[in-house]
Image (spheres, grey):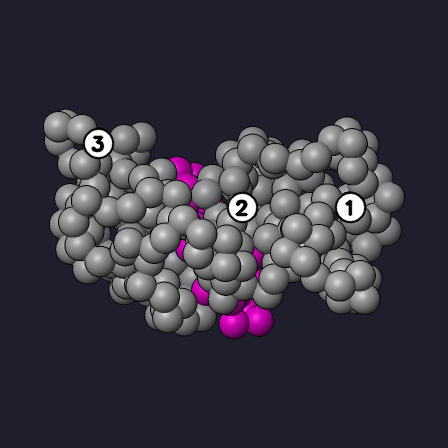
Amino acid sequence: MIALHGVTKFYQKSAPVLDDVNITIKAGEFVSVVGQSGAGKTTLVKLLIAEERPSKGRIELGGWDITDIKSNVVPYLRRQIGVIFQDFKLLPQKTVFENVSFALEVAGEPSSRIALVVPQVLHLVGLGNKFQRYPSQLSGGEQQRVVIARSLVHRPKVLIADEPTGNLDSINTEEIIQILKKINEFGTTIVLVTHNREVVNALRQRVITLADGRVINDEVEGKYTL
């Protein structure tokens, strides 16, 4: 499902941000990627969503070789990958329903499909009664649920969650993690990039630890111990 083969990433002539990284993630896994600031987590996410290209090595994702993927192909790849960021990136002038449906509209999906899919994903994340609310009328946890719903409309094989609970309190954090676990149970591969030790250790799932751009630990039912 996801494979990085000897992936190295340089920026200019500095030391590598990622250095000979080898990772294989099977379909349906729930994997946490952890590490302190500067470990290379953000760069790893950028490579997986084809925002950056590796300096060396090869990357495969969902049956695609994205090592040297062309810019005009990236939008089609992104329909196979759901992405959740710490900052919600919601459109303030659009309702919850419109924010989620917008991802389908720009992909040219017919209104009949939009009318079917959007309510399904909003119910999945617990926002079935807030279709017509605006982002300013939602709590931080609810806004993140909208982001998750938006990431699911293309039924992605992989969901990459980059610090999805970074701006949330402990209660909302737990609710978001439970939603991610539910999505994983449906067969979606989850890659959770986080510095939240409590979340990672409570999950008791596979943990990949980065330090100075290298994988220093990779454990099934691992813990974040740095």
Q: Is residue 149 left or right of residue 225?
A: right
Magenta residues, start to end:
178-199
Q: Which residue is mark 3?
A: 11
Instruction: Determine the CA span between mark 1 and mark 3.
Output: 38 Å
Q: Residue at x 72, y 44 (%)?
A: 99
Q: Is residue 37 left or right of residue 7?
A: right
Q: Residue at x 36, y 38 (%)?
A: 42
First in residue order: circle 1 vs circle 3: 3
Q: Is residue 40 left or right of residue 201?
A: left
Q: Is residue 120 visible?
A: no
Q: Which residue is mark 2?
A: 84
Secondary structure at badge 1 equals: helix
For label 1, the crowd category at 10 Å Cα-Cα, with few meaning under 14, some 14 to 19 and many 20 or more, is some
* Quarter of the image where the N terminus is located: bottom left
Determine contact: label 2, label 1, CB under 8 Å. no
Amino acid at pointer 1:
Glu
First in residue order: circle 2 vs circle 3: 3
Q: Which residue is mark 1?
A: 98
Q: Is residue 43 visible?
A: yes
Viewer-nearest residue: 118 or 194: 118
Viewer-nearest residue: 194 or 79: 79
State the image coordinates of residue 221 (x, y, percent, origin top left): 34, 61
Report if residue 180 lies within the magenta region.
yes
Q: Is 52 located above or below residue 191 in the figure?
A: above
Report if residue 214 lies within the magenta region.
no
First in residue order: circle 2 vs circle 1: 2
For label 2, the crowd category at 10 Å Cα-Cα, with few meaning under 14, some 14 to 19 and many 20 or more, is many
Secondary structure at badge 3 equals: loop
Q: Residue at x 61, y 62 (%)?
A: 154
